[in-house]
Image (tube, rainbow, N blue to C red):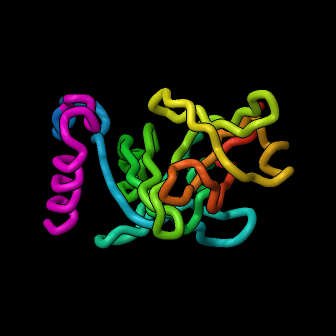
Amino acid sequence: MKRLTSLLVMAAALGPAGCGGNSSVPESGGPEERVAQGTIRQTGGAPNVETRLETDDGSIVLVGPLAAELARAAGAVARVRGISAGDDAPEAIQVGQYHLVLVDGLSPLVGMLDLEEGDLALRTEDGRNVELIGGSERMREASGSKVWVTTRDDGRSIVRWGILKSPGS
């Protein structure tokens, strides 16, 4: 019951826009939609490494192409939305969407990294274009990658960053 309550609270916190206006009750015969928030962890050893979301109610295995992106943000707090990954894995979510909530205690920006006339810019998922200040040569070489970036209070000066998805992968 505690697990169900926290899932309903998170769904309510997302609001109608975050849930696409859909009810959290699955339509008959369809997969169950799930929303969860927690810390991203990688567990196990090669070749059986799993990406998991550690929530207050336990651990959920994350699967699908977006789980690979989340694996690259291990340690971050994320909110994921997707469907149950099948009857055999009730504690698994096929990730359809995610939002990085915190990285090292800061709210990150997520988007595509671009070089515009030699300057770094981030095209965020909500369509904004943020000019970034700072950034290493390695970051410039990552142009075209989907990244997360934490910034100082000015919203532009880079504190930390990481690649979620490289071009062509």
**In the rendered structure, does residue 86 fall within the stretch colored magenta?**
no
Q: Is residue 143 left or right of residue 58?
A: right
Residue 9 occupies quadrant: bottom left
Residue 44: x %, y % from top left: 63, 72
Above/below status of 159 relative to 67:
below
Above/below status of 132 relative to 28:
below
Q: How many marks?
A: 0
Residue 63 visible at all:
no
Q: Is residue 142 left or right of residue 42?
A: right
Task: Determine the residue positioned at 62% across, 61% down.
Answer: 159
Residue 52 visible at all:
yes
Task: Determine the residue positioned at 71% across, 33% down.
Answer: 114
Q: Report the magenta residues as a range.
A: 1-22
Which is the main secondary structure of the residues drawn in magenta?
A: helix
Above/below status of 79 relative to 120:
below
Above/below status of 96 relative to 99:
above
Residue 22: x %, y % from top left: 20, 30
Task: Determine the residue positioned at 65% across, 64% down.
Answer: 49
Residue 169: x %, y % from top left: 74, 36
Q: Nearer the viewer, residue 147 or 31?
A: 147
Q: Nearer the viewer, residue 13 or 141?
A: 141
Q: Nearer the viewer, residue 96 or 126?
A: 126
